[in-house]
């Protein structure tokens, strides 16, 4: 695993860099926020460990800048500021985890390994099947009972996400974040409209509905009653 450590305390930084290398990780070091941002933008890192209080550019500004330009590399923020509000600010800035100083190195190592596991690419299924409803991701084709179903792009993404989580309750928040790429509630009925249209296309004319509304929770696609 290739790690970028952005830390201005040289003693701490060199200790962490040495410890990471001893555990089989390649560890580069940046001693201020501007240098760290430039190195992170170059890409190639699996994990970023970012101290919050940095010269030239503070750690939260580094993380915000990276997220703004679309960098998805997992970030562990290190800070002596450990109040709830401080942790919330760190996570809202784009951090994936927040570790308060002083910390045990074994915990830091466990956290970066957990972040690496979460960010590892999953093997993608190419075909989802629920009853006689089939979504072929390679052909970008949907059929039910062997008959083709024509979907608009957003309807296709909605169905794909629901079928990926078949048998599970999918909340409105999950749909907003993963189908519409919203990280806020637009306070509209956009989900209800698309679910209604999708239901009309995949369930109309069939005796057994597959797309169910779970009252007060969200939606579920499955064979059988709710």
Image (spheres, grey):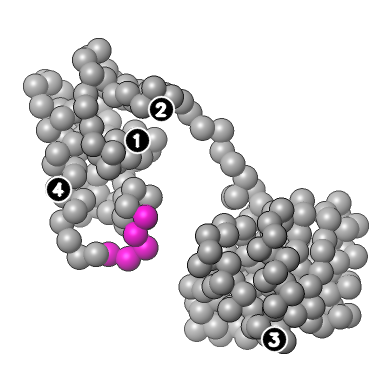
| Mark 2 or mark 1: whose residue is earlier in sequence | 2
Q: What's the distance in space between the residues labelled 4 and 1, CA to CA? A: 17 Å
Q: Are marks 2 and 1 in contact (CB under 8 Å)?
A: yes
Q: Nearer the viewer, residue 140 or 191?
A: 140
* Contact (Cβ within 8 Å) of mark 2 with mark 4: no
10 Å crowding of disc 3: few (<14), some (14-19), many (20+): few
Q: Secondary structure at mark 4?
A: helix
Residue matched to label 4: 193
Q: Are marks 3 and 4 in contact (CB under 8 Å)?
A: no
N-terminal label among 3 and 4? 3
Residue tagged 2: 137
Residue on which the image places disc 3: 56
Q: Which residues are magenta?
A: 181-185
Q: Give whichever of discs 1 and 3 has the lower sequence position.
A: 3
Q: Position of residue 74 (x, y in %)?
A: 62, 59
Whether residue 218 is visible to the viewer of this picture, yes or no, is yes
- The numbered mark, 2 or 4, whose residue comes first in the sequence reads 2
Between 54 and 208, the residue placed more toward the observer is 54
Q: Is residue 27 left or right of residue 34?
A: right
The residue carrying mark 1 is: 160
Q: Main secondary structure of the magenta part?
A: loop
Q: Give the x, y percent position of residue 144.
A: 23, 19
Pointer 2 or 3: first along the chain: 3
């Amino acid at each position: 695993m290739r790690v970028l450590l952005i830390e201005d305390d040289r003693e701490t930084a060199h200790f962490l860099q040495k410890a990471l290398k001893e555990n089989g990780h390649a560890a580069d070091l940046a001693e201020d926020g501007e240098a760290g941002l430039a190195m992170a933008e170059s890409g190639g890192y699996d994990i970023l460990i970012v101290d919050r209080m940095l010269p030239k550019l503070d750690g939260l500004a580094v993380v915000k800048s990276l997220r703004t330009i679309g960098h998805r590399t997992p970030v562990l923020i290190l800070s002596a500021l450990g109040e709830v509000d401080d942790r919330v600010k760190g996570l809202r800035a784009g951090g994936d985890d927040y570790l308060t100083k002083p910390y045990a190195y074994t915990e830091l190592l466990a956290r970066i390994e957990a972040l690496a596991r979460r960010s590892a690419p999953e093997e993608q299924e190419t075909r989802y099947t629920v009853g006689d409803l089939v979504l072929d991701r390679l052909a970008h084709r949907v059929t039910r009972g062997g008959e083709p179903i024509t979907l608009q792009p957003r309807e296709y993404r909605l169905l794909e996400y629901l079928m990926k989580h078949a048998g599970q309750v999918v909340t409105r928040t999950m749909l907003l974040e993963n189908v519409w790429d919203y990280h806020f509630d637009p306070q509209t009925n956009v989900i209800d409209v698309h679910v209604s249209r999708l239901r009309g296309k995949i369930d109309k004319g069939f005796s057994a509905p597959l797309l169910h509304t779970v009252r007060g929770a969200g939606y579920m696609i499955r064979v059988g009653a709710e």
